[in-house]
Image (cartoon, grey):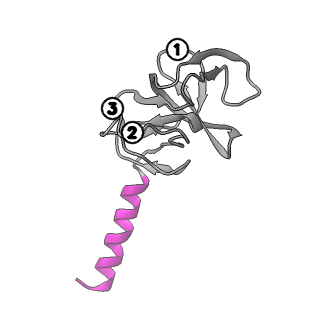
Amino acid sequence: MNRRQFRSGVVALVAALAMVPAVAVADSGPYRHSGRHAHAVHHGRGVPVVAGRHDGDARGEVVTPPGVPLNVRSGPGVTYRVIDQLRSGSVHGLRCTTTGSRVHGNPYWYRLAHRPGYVSAHYIHAFRTVPWC
């Protein structure tokens, strides 16, 4: 294989990868419950992850200190009104990821799948990648 063929192959590969949709997993939270979900994939704090396909809603666990509920807000930010609360350790469907106001330096928020509202990704341990809204 000569250089020209190699370069053409690389350009084709980059073009193909550019067509793959991007999804994100935000912070796994400061209160991660070790060993509770052996199958869970931990991604770095607020680091977007590229993945191929998305099969249904992702799920995530609320990782607040024991007995401290997580506020569900009407929009992706701390200035939106609180519309509900989630128990520490509970698991919920996550529809998509968006950005909003920062919570402990993390700008990512999850839209809940089966109820209205958004939660800060700082307090959610996502079990897999969550697509962008």
Residue bearing the label numbered 2: 128
Label 3 sits on a secondary structure element that is: loop
The kind of residue on which mark 1 rests is Arg
- Residue 41 visible here: yes
Q: Tell me the amino acid under the disc marked 3.
A: Asp
- Which of the two discs, 1 and 3, sits closer to the camera? 1
Could you say where residue 92 lies in the image, as x and y percent from the top left? 45, 22
Q: Quadrant of residue 82?
A: top right
Q: x and y percent of residue 54 in the render?
A: 36, 36
- Name the residue tied to disc 1: 115
Tag 2: amino acid:
Arg
User: Which corner quadrant of the image does residue 119 belong to?
Assistant: top right
Distance between the alpha carbons at the discs numbered 2 and 1: 20 Å
Q: Which residue was labeled with disc 3?
A: 55
Q: In which quarter of the image is residue 126?
A: top left
Nearer the N terminus, badge 3 or badge 2?
3
Q: What span is in magenta? A: 1-18
Asked whether 12 falls inside the magenta stretch, the response is yes
Which residue is at the far bottom?
A: 2
Query: Reading the chain from its start, which is encountered first: label 1 or label 3?
Result: 3
